[in-house]
């Protein structure tokens, strides 16, 4: 009898370890199948099992896992957060990208907290009359989400009819954006604005982005009134990262 407790200690310890292991892997086992598997690489701050289903109704209602946001909850979302939910719904419905959205709702008092990773590959881009960015024609993001260099890159993409890959990360309703694209402009008209900055097809390009050698080449082309072919590669942070040019 005195030895009975030591004999039970080992099995109980093993059971405890197994319980901890099951607790650790439960979120992985519970993760949705199909497209959710690809979300693992994209989501950094959302567990895959927390991805919600966002549906945009024809009357403008937004459903989160089948539950419509109330008027009071919608009123708490700014235009960009609302656009991000619309974008997520459109992307998920068309399987145009990788989407994981987690929406935390409070009823009394009303609250909405949106966390999301939305990756769209590829989408068309346009800059509307207000200077805001339209993706795939009907989802508009405020230009304030993009810095001047990113806007210039998007304008080049719109001018060339090029598609871009857009990644939106939302944490507590705050959106950050990154772009990936290869934009070919051929021919591209090189010129100068009133401040002496280089322009491509009318879009002002920062000299810091071009580098000294390409700045000299484009300056010579603009001075000689010669068109060129330019390829702009945008990666990760949305800034043009490599440029190449040749005569048109």
Image: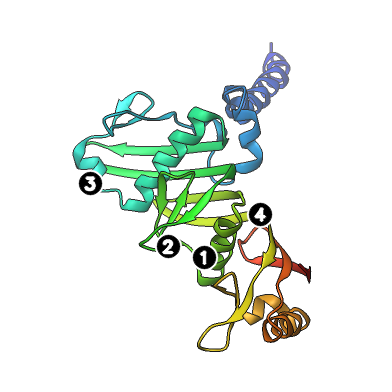
Query: On screen, 29 above or below 211?
Result: above
Residue at x-position 73% and y-position 16% = 7
- Cα–Cα span, label 3 and label 2: 21 Å
What is the x, y in percent for residue 129? 37, 61
Disc 1 crowd, CA 10 A, few/some/many (<14, 14-19, 20+): many
- Cα–Cα span, label 1 and label 3: 28 Å
Asked whether, in this view, residue 154 is left or right of residue 127, the answer is right
| Sequence-first tag of 4 and 3 | 3
- Cα–Cα span, label 4 and label 3: 34 Å
Q: Check disc 4 and report the residue beneath it.
A: 181
Label 3's element?
A: helix
What is the x, y in percent for residue 159? 56, 59
Q: Quadrant of the N terminus?
A: top right
Label 4's element?
A: strand
Q: Quadrant of residue 42?
A: top right
* Cβ atoms under marks 2 and 4 closer than 8 Å: no
Q: Check disc 2 and report the residue beneath it.
A: 143
Give residue 151's mark: 1
Disc 3 crowd, CA 10 A, few/some/many (<14, 14-19, 20+): some
Q: Quadrant of residue 39?
A: top right
Q: Check disc 3 and report the residue beneath it.
A: 75
| Sequence-first tag of 1 and 2 | 2
Q: Quadrant of the C terminus?
A: bottom right
- Cα–Cα span, label 1 and label 4: 13 Å
Residue at x-position 51% and y-position 71% = 148
| Sequence-first tag of 3 and 2 | 3
């Amino acid at each position: 009898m005195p030895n009975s407790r030591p004999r039970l200690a080992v099995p109980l310890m093993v059971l405890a370890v197994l319980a901890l292991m099951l607790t650790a892997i439960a979120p992985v086992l519970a993760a949705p199948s199909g497209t959710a598997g690809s979300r693992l690489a994209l989501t950094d701050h959302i567990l895959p099992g927390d991805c919600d289903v966002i549906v945009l109704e024809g009357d403008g209602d937004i459903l989160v896992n089948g539950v419509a946001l109330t008027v009071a909850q919608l009123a708490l979302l700014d235009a960009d957060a609302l656009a991000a939910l619309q974008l997520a719904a459109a992307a998920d419905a068309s399987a145009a990208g990788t989407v994981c959205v987690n929406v935390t709702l409070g009823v009394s008092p009303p609250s909405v907290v949106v966390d999301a990773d939305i990756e769209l590959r590829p989408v068309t881009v346009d800059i509307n009359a207000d200077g805001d960015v339209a993706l795939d024609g009907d989802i508009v993001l405020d230009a304030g989400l993009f810095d001047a260099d990113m806007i210039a890159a998007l304008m080049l993409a719109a001018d060339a009819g090029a598609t871009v890959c857009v990644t939106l990360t939302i944490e507590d309703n705050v959106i950050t954006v990154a772009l990936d694209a290869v934009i070919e402009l051929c021919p591209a008209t090189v010129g100068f604005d009133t401040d002496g900055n280089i322009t491509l097809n009318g879009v002002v390009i920062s000299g810091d982005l071009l580098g000294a050698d390409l700045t000299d080449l484009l300056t010579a082309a603009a001075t000689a009134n010669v068109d060129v072919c330019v390829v702009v590669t945008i990666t990760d942070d949305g800034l043009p990262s490599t440029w190449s040019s040749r005569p048109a």
